[in-house]
Image (cartoon, rainbow, N blue to C red):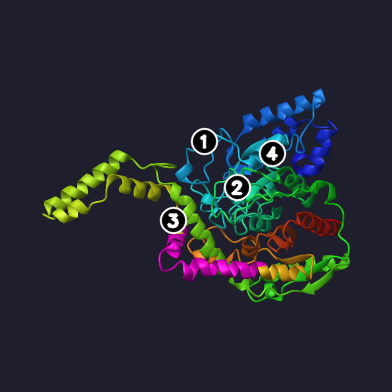
């Protein structure tokens, strides 16, 4: 069996037993990337030389008997929204095309401390705004199972590189489903932690009250390993929870006893693809065979989740992205071109004898802002900025943003009541298998509805994990998700591992 066919846990055992070196493992993945990524487009940049240097240092430390980190020698891919010192951090946007980070995000720092080998930066929807990884300013990413289909988004590159065995582990971010949805569409495992469980320091913000960093991997066991490496309190992040983080990799193989799993009947209503429904119900049957009790629960405000999310997230995005004006941060339009354009407009107005119009022409600074943002941002980012700015404007704040926050509170209360009856909630992660590239790119409303099953976990701040539950007749992955109460990632991982193990047996 080739090295890249092994799970990260199996690779780690071989590394620790000195049956393989970190350099050999890195070389195997770099060769795989060279062979496959030209058609998939999961990576924006592959940091081959740096990765081999990191791997060589791990081998040196292992040979010298020096202490090693949890991920020593394992390659990890990082979504291009997390700052990494000395590396470009573009967020797949022209706005940050040339931005080279002067510091490490906390998650990247933790990966380095764990002796991970950082193999490259993965593609994404621009500023994490999208569900198909088609909104990248640089390239689309394709689903490894069918190159005509989307890998999902916004962490499409992070999911695709794991599914195509170009990295054993990767880091994504989840604002409304951006880890779980691509994991489901690509057939891998993706975990959105509790809000505050993983530091957001050094994460380029989309929607600050919703964004969360999390792991993607090929198995639940590998996901637990990576989650253990990146979780923990960070005093540099004011939203980081000051709680001790469990040793997830040490408990993930312990089955849960007397497990109660909640099912929401509305999740199986019209609109759910028949193959997807059959696969998710198959997962329910697996849990029944393991002795779990299946309980119907009610989440009455879940139907408002997409509407609330697509008010709150754009409002926060419009605020966060206001800093990219071409002066303080990001792409700057050509100042001579702007000045020439304004001069031409003034001259034209004077030629018409319209002095008032000539005096009303924008200042160079205002036009520079406008041109810089027009050139730097893509269509979907502009759309969300405009939605957010409108919802926050005078006369509309109470009608939209404040109302959405009230709905968010009701959604969290629904989950609190449900979790008083059950340990986990099981649902589809997407309504259908991976869709064709280009199918939804010009229909933003339908693209937003792809997040139907995922946004409520972000609104409530609870952890959720997506994992495979079969394949469609056309060979596309089918997935489901489990949700847990806040800070119950350990329960979530153990519950997910039970199903994974049973399906393998």
Residue in front for this viewpoint, 11 or 246: 246
For residue 404: magenta? yes
Magenta highlight on residue 224: no
Q: CA distance from mark 3 to mark 2?
A: 27 Å
From the viewer's perspective, tell me whether residue 228 is left or right of residue 338: right
Q: Which element is circle 4 on? A: helix
Start-end of magenta stretch: 384-412
Crowd band around label 2 with a 10 angstrom C-alpha radius: few (<14), some (14–19), many (20+): many
* Residue position for label 3: 382
Which residue bears the numbered disc 1?
A: 100
Looking at the rendered structure, the number of numbered marks drawn on it comes to 4
> Residue 87 sits in which quadrant?
top right
Secondary structure under the numbered disc 2 in the rendered image: helix
**Disc with the residue nearer the chain's start (4 vs 2):** 2
Q: Can you tell which mark lies on residue 40?
A: 2
Q: Position of residue 407 (x, y in %)?
A: 58, 70
């Amino acid at each position: 069996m080739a090295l890249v066919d092994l799970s990260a846990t199996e690779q780690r055992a071989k590394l620790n037993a000195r049956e393989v070196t970190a350099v050999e493992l890195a070389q195997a993945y770099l060769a795989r990337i060279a062979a496959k990524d030209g058609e998939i487009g999961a990576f924006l940049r592959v940091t081959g030389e740096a990765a081999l240097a990191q791997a060589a240092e791990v081998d040196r430390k292992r040979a010298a008997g020096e202490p090693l980190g949890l991920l020593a020698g394992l390659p990890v891919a990082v979504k291009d929204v997390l700052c990494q010192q000395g590396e470009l951090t573009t967020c797949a946007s022209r706005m940050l095309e040339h931005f080279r980070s002067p510091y490490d995000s906390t998650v990247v720092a933790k990966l380095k401390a764990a002796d991970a080998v950082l193999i490259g930066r993965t593609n994404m929807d621009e500023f994490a705004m999208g569900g198909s990884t088609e909104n990248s300013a640089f390239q689309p990413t394709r689903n490894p199972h069918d190159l005509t289909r989307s890998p999902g988004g916004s962490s499409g590159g992070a999911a695709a590189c794991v599914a195509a065995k170009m990295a054993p582990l990767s880091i994504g971010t989840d604002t409304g489903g951006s880890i779980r949805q691509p994991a489901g569409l690509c057939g891998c495992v993706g975990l959105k932690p509790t809000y505050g469980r993983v530091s957001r320091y050094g994460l380029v913000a989309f929607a600050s009250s919703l964004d969360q960093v999390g792991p993607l991997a090929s198995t639940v066991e590998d996901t637990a390993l990576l989650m253990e490496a990146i979780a923990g309190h960070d005093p540099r992040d004011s939203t980081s929870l000051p709680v001790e983080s469990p040793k997830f990799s040490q408990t993930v193989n312990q089955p849960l006893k007397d497990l109660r799993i909640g099912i929401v009947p509305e999740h199986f209503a019209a609109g759910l693809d028949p193959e997807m429904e059959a696969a998710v119900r198959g997962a329910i049957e697996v849990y029944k065979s393991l002795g779990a009790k299946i309980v119907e629960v009610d989440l009455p405000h879940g139907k408002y989740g997409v509407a609330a999310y697509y008010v709150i997230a754009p409002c926060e995005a419009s605020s966060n992205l206001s800093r990219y004006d071409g002066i303080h941060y990001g792409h700057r339009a050509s100042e001579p071109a702007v000045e020439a354009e304004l001069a031409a407009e003034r001259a034209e107005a004077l030629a018409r004898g319209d002095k008032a119009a000539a005096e009303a022409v924008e200042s160079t600074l205002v036009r520079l802002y406008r041109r810089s943002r027009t050139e730097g941002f893509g269509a979907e980012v502009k759309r969300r900025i405009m939605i957010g700015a409108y919802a926050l404007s005078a006369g509309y704040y109470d009608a939209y943003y404040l109302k959405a926050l009230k709905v968010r509170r009701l959604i969290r209360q629904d989950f609190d009541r449900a979790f008083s009856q059950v340990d986990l909630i099981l649902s589809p992660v997407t309504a259908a298998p991976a869709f064709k590239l280009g199918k939804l790119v010009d229909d933003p409303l339908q693209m937003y509805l792809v997040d139907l099953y995922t946004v409520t976990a972000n609104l409530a701040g609870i952890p959720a994990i997506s994992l495979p539950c079969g394949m469609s007749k056309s060979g596309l992955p089918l997935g489901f998700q489990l949700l847990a109460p806040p800070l119950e990632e350990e329960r979530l991982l153990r519950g997910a591992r039970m199903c994974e193990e049973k399906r393998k047996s």
